[in-house]
Amino acid sequence: MPDMALLAHDLVRTLGARRVLDGVSLSAAPGHRIGLNLGSATNSKTRSAPAPAPS
C-alpha cells in the first residue's frame, strides 16, 4: 500500500440525537481528493480539500 496523505478510522457523526455515520473509515493517497457531505440539509456542502503531496 502506498503512503497515505489522509487516514481516518471509525468516524462517527451525529446530527442532533441521530447518528448518521457510524464506523466509517477512509484513506487518500497524495494528490487525490475526497469530498464528504456531512452537514445538515441547510449547510453548504461544496467544499473539497486536496490531499497534500509527499515531501
Image: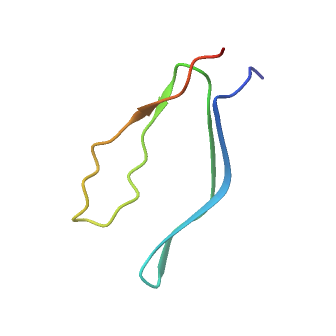
Q: Position of residue 18 (x, y in %)?
A: 46, 80
Q: Residue furthest top?
A: 55
Q: Position of residue 28 (x, y in %)?
A: 60, 31
Q: Residue furthest bottom?
A: 17
Examine the rendered structure and indicate whether residue 8 appears above or below residue 38.
above
Q: Is residue 50 left or right of residue 54?
A: left
Q: Quadrant of the C terminus?
A: top right
Examine the rendered structure and indicate whether residue 51 appears above or below residue 11.
above
Examine the rendered structure and indicate whether residue 44 appears above or below residue 3.
below
Q: Position of residue 14 (x, y in %)?
A: 49, 73
Q: Residue at x 32, y 41 (%)?
A: 47
Q: Is residue 20 left or right of residue 47?
A: right
Q: Residue furthest left?
A: 42
Q: Residue at x 29, y 50 (%)?
A: 45
Q: Quadrant of the N terminus?
A: top right
For the image shown, how many numbered marks are present on the structure?
A: 0
Nearest to the observer: residue 18 or residue 46: 46
Q: Position of residue 16 (x, y in %)?
A: 41, 82
